[in-house]
Image (cartoon, rainbow, N blue to C red):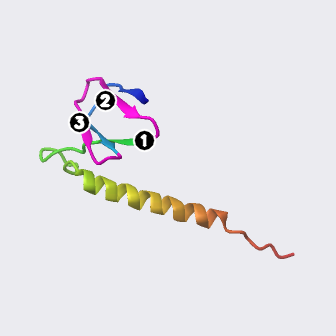
Amino acid sequence: MSINLTLFPTEAPAVIYFEDGTSMAIDPQKEGNFQLPSGSFCTISSTAGGEESNEHPPITGEEFAEAMISFWKGMAKKFREEMQPTATTY
């Protein structure tokens, strides 16, 4: 079973990274349709700029995965810190 997803037109190119390591580019101002197998996930990211702009060049799937791992580790650390019990003295 799969889920049909639609990515509505974006202002900039977008890349969909699938959990199996594949990716799919979506042109700006175009609607993108794809299927996602049940129980799997994907992440959608913009392809940041190019040489003519002041933005970063597009990243590879591996660089994106490393950035996401770093992001989620940071979120986990923040969550653990917020969940630490605090001692109250009277």
Quadrant position of the C terminus in the picture? bottom right
First in residue order: circle 1 vs circle 3: 3
Query: 54 and 63: which one is in front?
Result: 63
Residue at the spot 26% in from the left edge and 23% down from the top edge: 30
Distance of label 3 from label 2 (alpha carbons): 12 Å
| Amino acid type for the residue under numbered disc 2 | Thr
Q: Is residue 24 magenta?
A: yes
Residue at the limit of the structure toward the left, as seen here: 52
Q: Please state which of the two labelled residues, at mark 3 or mark 2, is closer to the viewer.
A: 3
| Amino acid type for the residue under numbered disc 1 | Ser
Residue at the limit of the structure toward the bottom, as seen here: 89
Whether residue 13 is visible to the viewer of this picture, yes or no, is: no
Mark 2 lies on a secondary structure that is loop
Task: Find disc 2 in the rendering and name its residue.
Answer: 10
Mark 3 lies on a secondary structure that is strand
First in residue order: circle 1 vs circle 2: 2
| Amino acid type for the residue under numbered disc 3 | Ala
Query: 88 and 22: which one is in front?
Result: 22
Q: Position of residue 44 (x, y in %)?
A: 35, 40
Query: 48 and 73: which one is in front?
Result: 73
Task: Find disc 3 in the rendering and name its residue.
Answer: 25
Q: Position of residue 40 (x, y in %)?
A: 42, 41
Quadrant position of the N terminus in the picture? top left
Distance of label 1 from label 2 (alpha carbons): 23 Å
Mark 1 lies on a secondary structure that is loop
Above or below, 89 against 82 in this view is below
**Range shown magenta:** 19-41
Q: Please state which of the two labelled residues, at mark 1 or mark 2, is closer to the viewer.
A: 1
Quadrant in the picture for residue 78: bottom right
First in residue order: circle 3 vs circle 2: 2
